[in-house]
Amino acid sequence: MSNSQFTPGVASGRLSADDYTRNFSDIAPRLEPHEARVAADRCYFCHDAPCMTACPTSIDIPLFIRQIATGTPEAAAKTIFSQNILGGMCARVCPTEQLCEEACVRETAEGKPVEIGRLQRFATDSLMEKGTHPFTRDKATGKTVAVVGAGPAGLSAAHRLAMKGHDVTIYDARPKAGGLNEYGIASYKAPGGFAAAEVGWLLKIGGIRIENGKSLGNGLTLDGLKKQFDAVVLAIGLAGVNALRAEGESLANVVNAVDFIAELRQEPDKAKLKIGRDVVVIGGGMTAVDAAVQSKLLGAENVTIAYRRGREKMSASTDEQDHATGVGVRILHNVAPVRVTGNGAAHEVEFAYTEDGPQGLKLSSETFRLKADQVMKAIGQTLSGQPEGLKLDGAKIAVTGAGRTSVPGVWAAGDCAAGGEDLTVTAVAEGRDAAEDIHASLMG
Amino acid sequence: MANLQSNFIGIKSPNPFWLASAPPTDKKYNVERAFEAGWGGVVWKTLGAEGPPVVNVNGPRYGAIWGADRRLLGLNNIELITDRPLEVNLQEIKEVKRKWRDRALIISLMVPCDEESWKDILKRIEGTEADGVELNFGCPHGMAERGMGSAVGQVPEYIEMVTRWVKQYSRMPCIVKLTPNITDVRRPAEAAKRGGADAVSLINTINSITSVDLDSFAPEPTIDGKGTHGGYCGPAVKPIALNMVAEIARSEATRGLPISGIGGVTTWRDAAEFMALGAGNVQVCTAAMTYGFKVVQEMISGLSQYMDEKCMTSTADLVGRAVPNVTDWQYLNLNYVTKAVIDQDACIKCGRCYAACEDTSHQAIDMSADRTFTVKEEECVACNLCIDVCPVESCITMRTLDQGELDKRTGRKVGTYANWTTHPNNPAAKAAE
């Protein structure tokens, strides 16, 4: 190993093979059966449970936990999957501390909620590892539906539509299905090719065909899809990345955090990945945290998240922030990048302190500089590549009811659709609900 | 610190915590470990008649039920009386008693139901210097099939007969251990008293099957594909034992007969409850088998602290204190009216009280959109179910209505004491008029 944490510039192989293995292994391994029984025993089986209300997919959490407690995790999994077919991934990536576990009455009672996320993973893994699929298709309807985008929303919609007896074709721009499950999220949250395995398992329902390498504007048009299919679901996510709008953005080693994360997810040999000695991540969301933590895990010496507003405004959860600081990432609040400097490649970032007042964000005249061999932009994604003629609501596709767009016969779900948080679990809920609405309108 | 010194039918021990006749008291090694840990006395595991000892199964002899985190709540066993030679037991009993003079050492006995057998075994144990005997008329498995144990305990005439033999052929204090596998525990207790018993001890284990293996379809514990009923004990049986102790303590025919309380005693509090209901001391088995002998130290410190707090200087101050308050249903005050009150600050909004009341009781709890749960006094019959299912201690309590206060459910003002015997709906009361 020739490189180390202290090798200047951007370099690969900064760590030992053991370090890479340890750093990118499962961050929260599946509970052992006894651990699961103990965790399940803590559930009070609340009436009209608050956790259920807090879950965007409304999983019957008390019921599935009771099914685990009584030794039937497969039945528990079916309870989960009937509401959320991507319950396996959601168990790994949901910010449960802001959703079900925050609402848990045990959190109120003793500040320690029932471990709902980990119990969900115990149940879903138990069923998925058997390789069986718990649902069957209804009688064929003869109807066809196109789904654009094979991310959580698209997969969820496709599964529900297929289950109802419709024939579904999913189109996706990338070589692999899964969307952010495959190309986003931190590696240590879903190691071992889980995202791909989950897609394979989901497809066992039958009636779903996936065509990769196709997107709107690249082989597909909305009009063409409308003609060919009885209904269309747009689940195209947010493919655009916000620009820094700061001097020096075009210097080498100034990258999009989502691209860094995607490359990292796809590279089985983490030692091959290059990372800066000093890395600066700009942003305050989950993407910023995932990029920063993984930079550190790849062996960067100094990693800083720089966010232009205060801690309370960060969209990354407190748990995520704590995780970042726990691995040695420094988080700076109320600082905004003014320029990136360097001779051809990034060398430093100059920041100004900010004040978040009623008139919006104001930059102060006081500035400072941080060393940065690599700058990652994680300041949000935007809708991009959407077809003409769709009414927008702000920067997203306007929808009414269960994802109906302004164009008849076209639904939208997931991050690209207005309303709801940009979470995997919300995307699953929206995809499922759009599918139910499509089914009702096609069969009605 | 309160003096826990105990004198039970003349048998002295430094505290009222004895180990019951059971696997933990089968040999010197265990008993000495128990005494080292602080146990006040032991009832040596039941000795049988001279001759080849009984044999035990060589597969599982215990079955269990568990609560959360595998906390053992109930234990069942199919073990028989001691399977060690009589001579060995007698020798060890003698050695232990000589070494531990201040501890109580009682010998449990079970021999065939004939006078010669009892006369013989009593003679054999005379030289051990043990403090007393306990007649095992309780074990419900194995030995009962051979006409011993609960087979004797279920026939009051046999109890009286054997007890009489024991008192005739021995000067040792005699405790008769009763089986709960009967319809009315007062009858065997009365028989023991008639036979001259110095005390009764109860309860022995309850006939039970703990579980069924749903793959092999055999009861558990399973021996080569078959199972048999065993004796059930542990925390789960405590309520049954408390009632039986109380029945004997308050029955006119047996009032004053000393009782050694047995059945699920796990903490000092359990022991205190048995004693308040009339037990002069307690015997413990499952708690020791679950946690080891050290548990007695918590029982000693807990009972001492409690007695200090209550200004009790001797265990005699506690024994029987609750007996006058055990009565028949017909004497309960029907004009005692309470209503559930939910402490909103303590409530964690789980809604279990609501589900229980709405689904299975009197629809007396209201649930608002923001999950605030309140009691509807006009519906509340004060059944206590909400308190029983609430996971937060003292979150729901019962408020006693003052005399003269309006009961919103009945529309009547709370009156003075009145019970069923004089209630207008009672046909017997009417007939008496």
Image: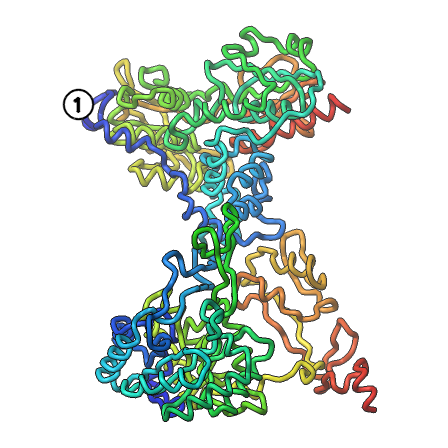
**Are there few (<14), some (14-19), or many (20+) residues within 10 Å of tag 1?**
few
**Hey, which quadrant is residue B283 in on the image?**
bottom left
**Hey, which quadrant is residue B335 in on the image?**
bottom right
**How far across and how far down the image is residue A111, in percent?**
45, 54
Q: Nearer the viewer, residue A286 or B331?
A: B331
Q: Nearer the viewer, residue B133 or B293?
A: B133
Residue B292 appears left or right of B415: left
Which residue is at a point 43% across and 86% down the rendered structure image?
Answer: B115
Which residue is at a point 37% across and 31% down the rendered structure image?
Answer: A188
Q: Is residue A172 above or below residue B84?
A: above
Q: Which of A357 and A37 is in front in this view?
A: A37
Q: In this view, does A122 lie above or below A288?
A: below
Whether residue A286 is visible to the viewer of this picture, yes or no, is yes
Q: Nearer the viewer, residue B245 or B114?
A: B114
Q: Is residue B378 above or below residue A136?
A: below
Q: Which chain carries label 1?
A: A
Report the quarter where the N terminus of chain B lies.
bottom left
**How far across and how far down the image is residue A308, in percent?**
41, 33
Report the quarter where the C terminus of chain B lies.
bottom right
**How far across and how far down the image is residue A14, in percent?**
22, 25
Most distant residue in the left direction: A2
Most distant residue in the top direction: A219
Callout 1: SS: loop
Please name the residue that numbered disc 1 is placed on: A1
**How far across and how far down the image is residue A159, in percent?**
59, 25
Tell me which amino acid carries mark 1. Answer: Met
By what rule are the colours in the image chosen?
rainbow
Which residue is at a point 40% across and 57% down the rendered structure image?
Answer: B60
